[in-house]
Amino acid sequence: MRSSLRSSRSRTAAAAAVLVLATSAGTAAATFSAPATAAGQQAAKPKTTPRPAVKNVIYLLGDGMGRTHVTAARERYYGLEGHLNMETLPVVGQVSTYSVQKNSGQPGAADFAPNAVTDSASAATAWSSGVKTYNAALGVDAKGNVVPTLMEQAKKSGYRTGNVSTAEITDATPAGQMSHALARGCQGPTYSDAACQDLAITGTALPTTDVRVTPIADQIARNKTADVILGGGLGRFDADDEAALKGNGYTVLGSPATQTVATETDLASATGKRVFGLFNKGNLTVEKYKADNPASDQAKEPSLPEMTQKAIDLLKTSPSSSKGFYLQVEGALIDKRSHANDAAQTLQETKAFDDAVKVALDFAKKDKHTLVIVTADHECAGFNIIEKGTYTNAEASAPPANVDSGNPANSSSPARASSGKKSDTRSTGFANAPGASDVNNFGPATFRTPDDAAGVQDGTADASLWLTYLSGNHTGADVPLFAFGPTSSKVAGSVDNTFLHTVMAQALYLTTK
């Protein structure tokens, strides 16, 4: 049962709140036909309906992944002359990510009020629904109006759909495709109705039957927006949710009712038209911990590349009547470890995300009808590569707190200890007094690369990759974008995150605008 904080709303009312959206953008795909043959032609070939240029769209995002995350991961694992998989995609661009204030109009409106730094919820709404909204909002515009998501539109138009994340599946990025909420924290199972409301938007409290104040877990379990759902967050679901999922035809891996998490083995053998698998009660575990602790329960979790491959396998074997599929894949822990200024785990999570990109790219190259877009929702923490032997972030007295402490495995000791004391041995400039010790510095963090001489170790002054952070939160920097496949040229150059919605909707023939 849900926590006692939950109101006495009935499950019938909650289920009724799960909106099935009809939208003019969700129009049927254009009709294609072969050219007519000449009259009287003897060996006329049967008419065929050629496939559209794009049959599938795979949208991958590294949460919090800025340009420096990409560069640093490349140098760390492949050296200065190497490249990540995402960097091999032929189309390159950058994405602006700003959000807007509550009750703001859209860009160009008289009441437009921008916010330079987005959070994951408003960013997810931008590409999934094509509108700017306020930080913490999901599937609603800045004035609280419900807006359809791309995944809802794709599902309505006959596509198969998938949603994969290393975060809780109710967290902002995956939830942005499958729910509508005034406040991203309205996830369940423990919540108060007041926590789901936002009187600054609605003026008065909404009835509990309104989808915008229905817990995100309730919505996901009942609206069938995604056919394949893989990630973390089992603790957000309960026995009623499991019954709803099974009633909607999902193969449920593990059990929300007993809080039994699914495993990598469960995923490997999973079959069915709809599959729901959550592998941790909270966010999934960082790859570094699993590698260092191979006998742990956390090591039984699948990796992001494994979940991506399984999602593609399940979606591509859809019924013959299906048009194709739309899949979103999130590498969420890049952001969570950047918030904690944990460079070691940030780098390894960026590589894991890039390995998932390779899975998608390999499929797309063989399929030839798949659009792949790789980007981020925002940059996190002002991650920077600095000159060897220099020092920055001297004002910080300690690393930021671990924002992902719900999963103790998602933490490690920073390369430097807790003090932000400046160092004369790793800094130039008159402000650093002679004789200062470098023992207590937590930044920069230093890493060996394939270009370093044998014997050079991480965390030493000899390592060639020196990294530091500007803050413990998001920044307003544009984020990188890489793309491959039919229509990918549309995202070249500088674009806004709302334009990504336009490109993907057009690729799936959901709109002709």
Image (tube, grey):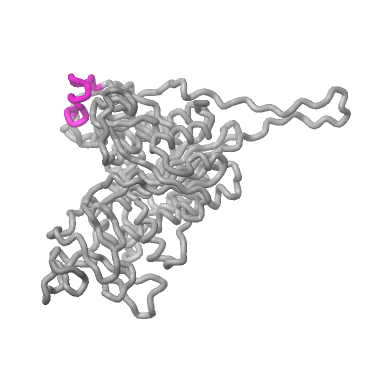
The question of residue 197 being in magenta is answered with yes
Question: Residue 469 appears at what percent x and percent y?
Answer: 24, 57
| Point 39% across, 56% down: residue | 70
| Point 20% across, 27% down: residue | 198
Q: Is residue 134 left or right of residue 58?
A: left
Residue at the extreme front? 430
Question: Residue 60 appears at what percent x and percent y?
Answer: 43, 46
Q: Quadrant of the N terminus?
A: top left
Q: How many labels sit on residues? A: 0
Question: Residue 472 appears at what percent x and percent y?
Answer: 21, 52
Q: Which residue is at the front of the view, 197 or 92?
A: 92
Q: Which residue is at the front of the view, 321 or 56?
A: 56
Q: Is residue 396 left or right of residue 267?
A: left
Rendered image quadrant of residue 73: bottom left
Residue 458 higher or lower than 317, as above or below: below
Rendered image quadrant of residue 459: bottom left
Question: Residue 365 appears at what percent x and percent y?
Answer: 58, 50
The question of residue 210 being in magenta is answered with no
Residue 78 higher or lower than 470, as above or below: below
Residue 41 higher or lower than 120, as above or below: above
Residue 24 seen from this side:
yes
Residue 406 seen from this side:
no
Q: Which residue is at the front of the view, 47 or 237?
A: 47
| Point 57% across, 37% down: residue | 55
Magenta-colored span: 193-208
| Point 16% across, 73% down: residue | 424
Q: Is residue 313 left or right of residue 298?
A: right
Residue 402 higher or lower than 414, as above or below: above
